[in-house]
């Protein structure tokens, strides 16, 4: 695992440069997308670079990590809406090449893994991390061999995410998420974490044991993972 520590602003800029390099070498790369507060600055930088002509997404494809069950893509808290609003509507990616798991058609979630495979597999998967160590919506205890599946959200995750809804009762109880194996299948991974609320879990997943109790700890075994941290999120690392 390679660890990059910088200011919050520079972390977004440096992660964006990984997209510039990847798409320069492989214009039709498959990008794994993430939502949440953490990638917002990165997406702003990608929009800026795209408008400046320094990166093109016109042949790229994308597959997002997860979606709330029960929310249509037009719901302003759905992750489809988030991606369109923060990134896809502002760059030259073709909308038909963007994929977010459906929160409505949830009959056969593993189909998503087949679609990723058919597209050639994810070249670079972006991840945030929850304070409990979740990646995507893979909460503690998720098996390492999981593919895309439906999960019941932990109360803590619903509480943390309730800031985006008018009350906790409106936060969906279930989500569909790429599994741990889906994520580990990506050729490369970028995990970003910023802010002091992430410091403890950052230390745990990088320096602690590999355990399903800390889902992100499995990334210690991924051959090409980069972790981008701001100084607050990195504060408890021992070296
Ligand atoms: P955040 O969420 O970026 O809003 O902190 C990260 C996550 O829960 O994966």
Image (tube, rainbow, N blue to C red):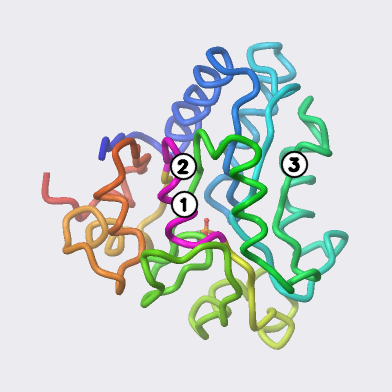
Residue range in magenta is 178-190
- Which sits earlier in the primary sequence, circle 2 or circle 3? 3
How many marks are shown on the rendered structure? 3
Quarter of the figure with residue 11: top left
Label 2 element class: loop
Q: Residue at x 28, y 59 (%)?
A: 217
Q: Is there CB contact under 8 Å for labels 1 and 2?
A: yes
Residue furthest out toward the right: 74
- Residue 169 in picture, x, y percent from top left: 70, 88
Residue 150 falls inside the magenta stretch? no
Q: Which residue is drawn at 42% across and 36% down?
A: 188
Q: Is there CB contact under 8 Å for labels 3 and 1?
A: no
Q: Which residue is drawn at 68% across and 64% down?
A: 67
- Residue 150 in picture, x, y percent from top left: 61, 74
Q: From the viewer's perspective, is 213 left or right of 143?
A: left
- The vertical placement of 88 against 47, above or below, is below
- The residue under label 1 is 183
Q: In which quarter of the image is the C terminus?
A: top left
Label 3 element class: strand
- The residue under label 2 is 186
Crowding near pointer 1: few (<14 within 10 Å), some, many (20+)? many
Mark 2–mark 3 Cα distance, whole angstroms, equals 17 Å
Q: From the viewer's perspective, is 166 left or right of 31?
A: right
């Amino acid at each position: 695992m390679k660890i990059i520590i910088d200011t919050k602003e520079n972390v977004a800029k440096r992660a964006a440069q990984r997209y510039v390099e990847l798409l320069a070498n492989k214009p039709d790369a498959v990008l794994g997308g993430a939502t949440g507060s953490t990638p917002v600055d990165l997406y702003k930088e990608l929009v800026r670079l795209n408008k400046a002509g320094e990166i093109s997404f016109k042949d790229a494809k994308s597959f997002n990590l997860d979606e709330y069950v029960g929310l249509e893509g037009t719901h302003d808290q759905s992750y489809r809406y988030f991606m369109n609003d923060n990134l896809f509507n502002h760059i030259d990616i073709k909308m038909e090449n963007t994929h977010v798991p459906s929160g409505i058609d949830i009959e056969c979630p593993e189909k998503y893994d087949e679609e990723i495979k058919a597209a050639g597999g994810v070249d670079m998967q972006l991840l945030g991390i929850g304070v409990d160590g979740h990646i995507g919506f893979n909460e503690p205890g998720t098996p390492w061999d999981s593919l895309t599946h439906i999960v019941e959200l932990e109360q803590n995750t619903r509480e943390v995410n309730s800031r985006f809804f008018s009350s906790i009762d409106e936060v969906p109880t279930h989500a569909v998420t790429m599994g741990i194996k889906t994520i580990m299948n990506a050729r490369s991974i970028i995990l970003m974490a910023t802010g002091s609320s992430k410091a403890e879990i950052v230390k745990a997943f990088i320096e602690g044991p590999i355990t399903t109790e800390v889902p992100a700890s499995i990334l210690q075994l991924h051959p090409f993972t980069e972790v981008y941290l701001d100084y607050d999120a990195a504060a408890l690392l021992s070296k």
